[in-house]
Image (cartoon, rainbow, N blue to C red):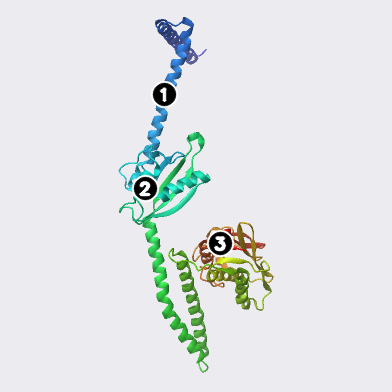
Amino acid sequence: MTPLSLFLALMLGICLFAWARREKYWTKRWETVAKTLGLRKRDAALLQEHAAAVFLARQHAEQQAEQRRVFESLLDEISQGLVLVDENLRIRYANAPLKKLLHRKEIHAGRHLIEDVRDHQISDLVQESITEKRHTTRRIQILPSDVGAGANLGGRYFIIEAAPLAADVGGGAWLMLQDVTESAMTEQIRRDFVANASHELRTPLTLINGYIEMLQDDSTKASPTMKRSLDVMEKHGKRIARIIEDMLAISRLEDASSSLNKEPFDVGACAKDAADHLAPMLEGRDARIEVDFPKDGGLLTGDRFYWDQVFTNLIENSIKENTKPGLVIRVSGTWEAETCTLKVSDNGIGIPAHDLPFVFKRFYRGNKHHSSQIKGTGLGLSIVRRAVEAHGGTVELTSSPGIETTFTMRLPLQHTKA
């Protein structure tokens, strides 16, 4: 045996001896305690085990309390307000930022949520989340006229989120508030600028295009260069006018104070009118548009002006993006028990997967390799999405390049009429 091995064995023996002496000492101590309490000697071991369990439970409780203090400190450092409530909407916990966001001196645990937040929009969202057992998000504006809102909160915007809590953590729900007033005001300023600038540009541009048409009518003696110049001016003047009209359409759809002119109309006839209007773009091409709707055409309650734009933009996009022969564009509509489903599909080149998340964004142009040949405002699909959402519906896009690209618009029953 080497000196090192001998040394290690000796140290192990010393440790075992010390541990045995310690155990013997504490065993005698617990026997003495048991004897003092009038317990039998054999119960001393049970008393020792019970004391150890109590010690471990206390240690665990202290660790949990420490973890709770750490988590609460972290939650007090975030900018969002967080509150936990039970199934009766009574507050279990609220972090410090919630008081700042709502301008409250204190948030009292045990009180009903409405008593401290003082806004029914918030308490209603939490109740909805608990009742429907789902995550819910909404943007709200607290108005000065709201009961208990106070002057400090009047006109402020909040994003509120709520979701139910599992039963093993006590049930109820959590609620998070985020003040987005600054970004909401910035967005409103941008919308106002776009709307006002578009209105101001439309009148002089109309005059310019009018003078260009007049010069073209009187250009019989003009040089070929002058005629080409006028044609180019006319082409780009009309394109700018289209951009302005599209921007105005988006501004109207985004304006909460601008209501839609909802009336029952024949959506099948609307789709056919859009197809007929764009038919000249198919002349001389191996392409066709198919319109498939119920025999009565299918009635939709909505603003036909915007649905004309929806079908026109979707069909026009398909025509412009697919120049190869054999193009088939299909516009269809079906009515079910709860929804109306409208589809515009084609068998063209499709949309790459990396472009799909962005096609509804303003001015986004996919297929940049041929964007110089395909002209457009980049606002058409943004108008489509805004128009469908304004009617309470949703729009989805699926694409298998070279096989099929489909825009699917679903509207709830209350917005439709078969």
Query: Vertically, is 363 above or below 184?
Result: below
- Residue of label 1: 59
Q: Circle 2: is it few (<14), some (14-19), or many (20+) Cα within 10 Å? A: some
- Identify residue for label 3: 415
Mark 2 or mark 1: which is in front?
A: 2
Q: Amino acid at mark 1?
A: Gln
Q: Is residue 198 visible?
A: yes
The local crowd at label 1, few if under 14, some if 14 to 19, many if 20 or more residues have their Cα within 10 Å, is few
SS class, disc 2:
loop
Residue 281 x %, y %: 62, 76
Q: How many marks?
A: 3
Residue 118, which numbered label? 2
Q: Are marks 2 and 1 in contact (CB under 8 Å)?
A: no
Residue 146 in the image, given as x and y percentages of width and height: 36, 53
- Residue 392 lies left or right of residue 91; in this view the side is right
Q: Identify the mark nearer the N-term, 3 or 1.
A: 1
- Residue 360 rendering spot, x and y as whole percentages: 53, 62
What amino acid type is highlighted by mark number 3?
A: His
In front here: 202 or 393?
A: 393
Along the line of sight, the residue nearer the viewer: 182 or 256: 256
Label 3, label 1: how far apart the Cα atoms are: 61 Å
